[in-house]
Image (cartoon, coloured by chain):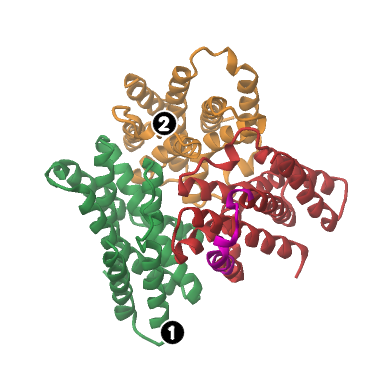
Chain colours: A orange, B red, C green
Amino acid sequence: MNLLAVLDYGSVLVFAITGALVASRAQLDLVGFAFIASLTALGGGTIRDLLLDRDPIFWIADPTYLAVAVAAALAVFFTAHLLESRRRALLWLDSLALSIAVAAGAGVAMALDQTAVIVVLMGMITGCMGGLMRDVVVGDVPVVLKQGELYVTAAFAGSATAALARHYGFDPLVTLPGCAVVTWILRAGSL
Amino acid sequence: MNLLAVLDYGSVLVFAITGALVASRAQLDLVGFAFIASLTALGGGTIRDLLLDRDPIFWIADPTYLAVAVAAALAVFFTAHLLESRRRALLWLDSLALSIAVAAGAGVAMALDQTAVIVVLMGMITGCMGGLMRDVVVGDVPVVLKQGELYVTAAFAGSATAALARHYGFDPLVTLPGCAVVTWILRAGSL
Amino acid sequence: MNLLAVLDYGSVLVFAITGALVASRAQLDLVGFAFIASLTALGGGTIRDLLLDRDPIFWIADPTYLAVAVAAALAVFFTAHLLESRRRALLWLDSLALSIAVAAGAGVAMALDQTAVIVVLMGMITGCMGGLMRDVVVGDVPVVLKQGELYVTAAFAGSATAALARHYGFDPLVTLPGCAVVTWILRAGSL
């Protein structure tokens, strides 16, 4: 399993947990948990794959991604009542998911030899769109859009770091973790 | 006209009526009716076709689907005032549309020889996404997400039935109606 | 630069300004401005390109579109406080963007030799979907759906004009400006 796959699975897992926590606040049933968790976890990457015309979509090519999202939803379904402050946990997990997903999105675009502009955008889209769809669907104000949250800004800084590091010849093994760290520091710093 | 086409037209017709009833509550004009009716009726299948990279999209290949949706919108536009309780009518029609659309979505995925996981998902996506987009666009809480509605659960049970029946060698002529019936019983039972 | 490109750039520019004005009301930061401006400006055309399976998407093929949207967002970010009534400016700009985008969408479908039905739809989708996504994402009631706004109706009339004019053999140099003018007169007349 290469670095790109590790990042993809990681972001799917953590975003699925954030989706399941939102489903928990909305008091959905088990299938509702799995639905929102999958939308959150797979949504950003799906839009990235549609825009880049990757065929098949990553979770159709490898349904393990979907299994990870559903398993995370089940785990949260049976343990969400144990978490004292879901809101706080949600924000921290979301910042983690964002940073991994931005790196995964930028990594896919770099693996397809896209230009720097598209690398930056795919990082931002993969990182932000899943959480955006989660919030829009359940009727919350999108975290992405809240004042002072540095959400999109963090995604931009992270994927710009990745594009710059590639430009100066760094290996993806350095570029992508660097992208995730920059994204996370900015986003977590705003919490 | 084969079974799959009948299911597709049926779900387009009934979902278009639900979309037009929502447009009626929002007091839109005639074109607004046609717009929301088409979004609801064609939205789920469009997402399915984009994800499966079917080209062209079903309603670009055959604009009759669009004509059916627009005709249904016109019919509701001139008769909606006759319906005493639109809310009730909407929920029952929606349960019918859901069950037909789930069967149509699962049927398309089976016709493309997709795996069981993808068959189940395409059934759920085709069934749930049109109504979800309808509700998000007009600013309602999505029916899909209301507590105790068994909406996504019904779609899951129906398309899982279809995937199982195919696994045991049943003919689509049995599988798809079975899928629609299972979906409808669960969804209607929760109303 | 041909007429189609002028229309495309024009609609991207004006829609980006409307998106940035919405970002201004939501008090987002600079990157948030660029994000909403790009979603608004490129959203409708992106959906059009996905549905028509154009590959690559127009702003991946030519990132200048994206640069225009981001530049417009920056310009509004530093000048929005000068505008006395943003709401009013927003509606007028939006009507202008709508009419140009409808012409651009219909023009792309005509350049691909699509049927009249698809030309009309692509005009409507390109014109309405960007603004619809902008409003849904920031949690506003979509302008598209407000009573008495003639929004979708104007888009329909404009793209139907384009399809009819093509049918009677008019040149795109006449057809597309005609489409924009018809759309704008109807939409602006309802303001």
| Placement of the N terminus of chain A among the 4 image quadrants | top right
Q: Which residue is mark 2?
A: A171
Q: Position of residue B169 (x, y in %)?
A: 88, 50
What segment carries the magenta color?
B71-88
Q: Tell me the kind of residue under disc 1.
A: His
* B169 w.r.t. C155: above or below: above
Q: Position of residue C146 (x, y in %)?
A: 38, 55
Which disc is residue A147 wearing? none
The answer to whether residue B44 is left or right of residue C178 is right
Residue A66 found in image quarter:
top right
Q: Main secondary structure of the magenta part?
A: helix
Name the residue rendered at 47%, 44% in the picture.
A48
Name the residue rendered at 54%, 14% in the picture.
A83
Q: Tell me the subunit letter for badge 2.
A: A
State whether discs 1 and 2 lie on one chain: no
Is residue B75 part of the magenta span, yes or no?
Answer: yes
Q: Which residue is nearer to you in this view: C28 or C35? A: C28
